[in-house]
Image: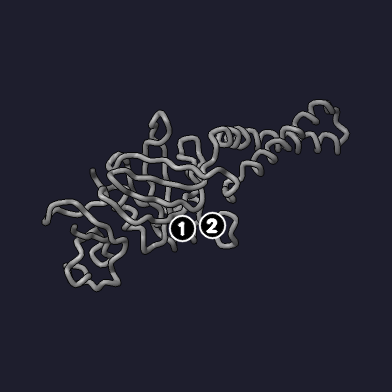
Amino acid sequence: MPTAAWCSGCKTNVWVSPDGGCPNGHPRSSLRGLYEVTSEPGAKPEYAAAASPVKAFATTVNARQTGSRFLGECEINVASGVVTITGHRLPQSWVLLRTLANVAFIPSLLAVFVFIIMWATGSSASLLLAAVFVVAFALCIGTLIYTDVWSPTHAEVESADWHVGAARDAKRVKDATAGIGAPAPSMLIRALNGKNVLRLRVPVGPARAFRTLALRPSPEFLSQLETMLTATA
């Protein structure tokens, strides 16, 4: 049975030559993810047949209402014409709670400041109404901490799959979350990293609704992952 692999020199899948290297002259060390293919000789080896899993980091963009909800380290595999991603995935209820908390955060914070100023200046203010806004603000903070997207390992590990070729709108983008909370400016970190995130829309869930999937692999695997996820059946 013929064998194929990903060649870092060719930036695509190639047949493995009899000497174990790339048929285009690249050494064995340039080949990754060897797999057997049932295709006829001369056909282009595709990841729809099989491939070695690739690990990538699912960014917090996936935690939005239109996102796939996968976060943190994930493993992507392609076999028998099906793409499978496995990793920690936020429950839908958490995404909804985070959305509500983000919407209410600023108004409740401003209301708390207003009542503090009114109390400090001796102006009349409803203590009951002030207490309501303080509780609302505390609930927003508690919700954002409980549904933390920066440490998603407390979420359950789930898998989702779709047929090869079903992904849409695949493109490389800059990491929208790079540098958040870091001492260096976010814009500088994004500029240095370049377009190191692969973002696409994939059909996940029972309804097969298209959701955003943003993955940041190691730089040497970016092209390989792009080929895996955008290959045609």
**What is the basis of the colouring in this image?**
one colour
In the rendered structure, which amino acid carries the disc numbered 1? Arg
Q: Residue furthest left?
A: 42
State which tag comes first along the sequence, 1 or 2: 2
Disc 2 marks a residue whose amino acid type is Gly
Q: At 17% across and 54% down in the image, what residue appears? A: 44
Taking the spot 37% from the left edge, 36% from the top edge, the residue there is: 203
Q: Confirm or deny contact between disc 1 and disc 2 (CB under 8 A).
A: yes
Quadrant of the image occupied by residue 191: bottom left
- Quadrant assignment for the C terminus: top left
Q: Secondary structure at mark 2?
A: loop
- Pointer 1 local density, CA inside 10 Å: few below 14, some 14–19, many at least 20: some
Q: Which residue was labeled with disc 2?
A: 179
153 and 151: which is toward the camera: 153
Residue 223 screen position, x and y as percent: 32, 58
Which residue was labeled with disc 1? Answer: 190
